[in-house]
Image (spheres, grey):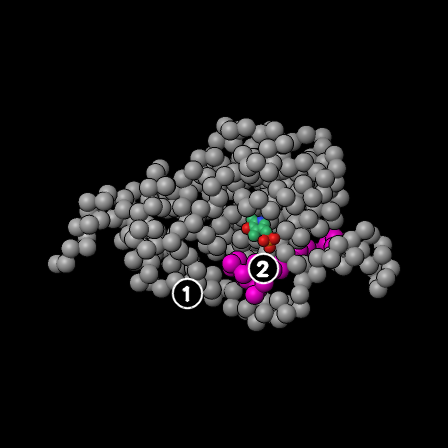
């Protein structure tokens, strides 16, 4: 597929999702999850996150269910799988299709099983910044269903069953061959790159304990968190980000506005306060530098900068006085 967004779009279409249907997902995610649901004409219905894992809280699914609910799209945010067993059990009970948004979780494992093998279909993005990135846009759907495979293969290539035999009204969502060649070389190195990320994350956790920021938690069900993003939580996020920028440390915010409060999706009718955990996370998260090539020394430098900033400006200056 030519992007993770296209992958989500076609997985939803293959699941039979369309106008009049509702799809359960989270508001604390990249906007593409919601956008893809809207492309089908269905309505996204949000379910709040668990504040520790940042992922869909399965206990809240029941309250969001209606006779129109057709599918669930849990997101494996930051590279940690959502708590899939209760989500899939709920889906089976209510005859819903489960589509994993695994766009941040290439190689992650839940109870030993890979992200991408936990629902009915799963979608990956190969955007250059993802854990498995092409040199341009890309994506894919994985599934063990022959029916979904056949439908999605047709939809991504103009709905053709064979050349000029258009069975479905389709799209031009094909992956560029060149990107496939790049991914073919990079895929065998994915686990190694993920292992480096998780080693660096463990070092951050150790160095930042007691600094006053909350380091990311790994759920007991998570066999492997692949740290697409290493996000800490801090009450005064803007101040810390400002201090880190001044110290030469670039940070990011994934994501500052939960989707239900974005202007783009205001017509869904949600309001501030509807998803308190998503809103609190959006206000408190700060992503520290995280990529496989990050060195131990760089982690030490960033952790020092965070610790100094949390101690306040005075000690930040003292730290620069030569011994
Ligand atoms: C990146 C991403 C997408 C979209 O992937 P693209 O390849 O950029 O279209 C969807 N969902 C999540 C959670 C993502 O991080």
Q: Which of marks 1 and 2 is nearer the N terminus?
A: 2
For image coordinates 59% across by 33% down, the residue present is 266
Asked if the magenta segment contains residue 147, the reply would be yes
Secondary-structure class at tag 2: loop
Badge 2: residue crowd in 10 Å (few <14, some 14–19, many ≥20): many
Asked if the magenta segment contains residue 83, the reply would be no
Secondary-structure class at tag 1: loop
Residue 293 is marked as: 1
Image x and y of residue 302, in percent? 32, 55
Q: Which portion, as a residue range, is magenta?
A: 127-152
In which quarter of the view is residue 82 placed? Answer: top right
Mark 1 → mark 2, Cα distance in angstroms: 18 Å
Task: Say if disc 2 is inside 8 Å of ligand 1.
Answer: yes
Image x and y of residue 322, in percent? 14, 58
Residue 42 visible in the displayed image: yes
Circles 1 and 2: CB distance less than 8 Å? no
What is the quadrant of the N terminus in the image?
bottom right
In which quarter of the view is residue 153 placed? Answer: bottom right
For image coordinates 34% across by 51% down, the residue present is 245
Badge 1: residue crowd in 10 Å (few <14, some 14–19, many ≥20): few
Residue 126 is marked as: 2
Residue 113 visible in the displayed image: no
Q: How many marks?
A: 2
For image coordinates 29% across by 58% down, the residue present is 300
Q: In this view, does 63 lie above or below 304?
A: above
């Amino acid at each position: 597929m030519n992007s993770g967004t296209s992958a989500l779009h076609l997985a939803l279409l293959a699941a039979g999702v369309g106008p009049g249907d509702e799809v359960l997902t989270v508001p604390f995610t990249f906007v593409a999850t919601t956008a893809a649901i809207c492309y089908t004409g269905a309505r996204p219905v949000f379910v709040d996150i668990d504040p520790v894992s940042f992922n869909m809280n399965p206990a809240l699914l029941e309250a969001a269910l209606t006779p129109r609910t057709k599918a669930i799209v849990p997101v494996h945010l930051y590279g940690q799988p959502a708590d899939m067993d209760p989500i899939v059990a709920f889906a089976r009970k209510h005859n819903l299709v489960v589509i994993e948004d695994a766009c941040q979780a290439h190689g992650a494992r839940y109870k030993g099983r890979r992200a991408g093998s936990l629902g009915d279909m799963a979608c990956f993005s190969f955007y250059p910044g993802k854990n498995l990135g092409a040199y341009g846009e890309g994506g894919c759907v994985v599934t063990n269903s022959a029916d979904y495979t056949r439908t999605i293969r047709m939809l991504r290539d103009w709905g053709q069953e064979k050349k000029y035999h258009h069975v479905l009204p389709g799209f031009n969502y094909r992956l560029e061959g060149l990107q496939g060649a790049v991914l073919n070389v990079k895929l065998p190195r994915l686990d190694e790159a993920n292992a480096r990320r998780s080693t660096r994350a463990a070092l951050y956790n150790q160095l930042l304990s007691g600094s006053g920021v909350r380091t990311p938690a790994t759920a007991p069900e998570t066999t492997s968190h692949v740290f697409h993003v290493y996000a800490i939580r801090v009450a005064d996020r803007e101040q810390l980000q400002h201090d880190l920028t001044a110290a030469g440390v670039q940070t990011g915010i994934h994501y500052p506005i939960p989707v239900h409060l974005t202007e783009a999706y205001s017509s869904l009718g949600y309001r501030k306060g509807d998803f308190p955990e998503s809103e609190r996370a959006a206000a408190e998260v700060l992503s520290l530098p995280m990529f496989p090539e990050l060195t131990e020394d760089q982690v030490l430098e960033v952790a020092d900068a965070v610790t100094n900033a949390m101690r306040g400006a005075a000690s930040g200056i003292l730290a620069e006085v030569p011994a």
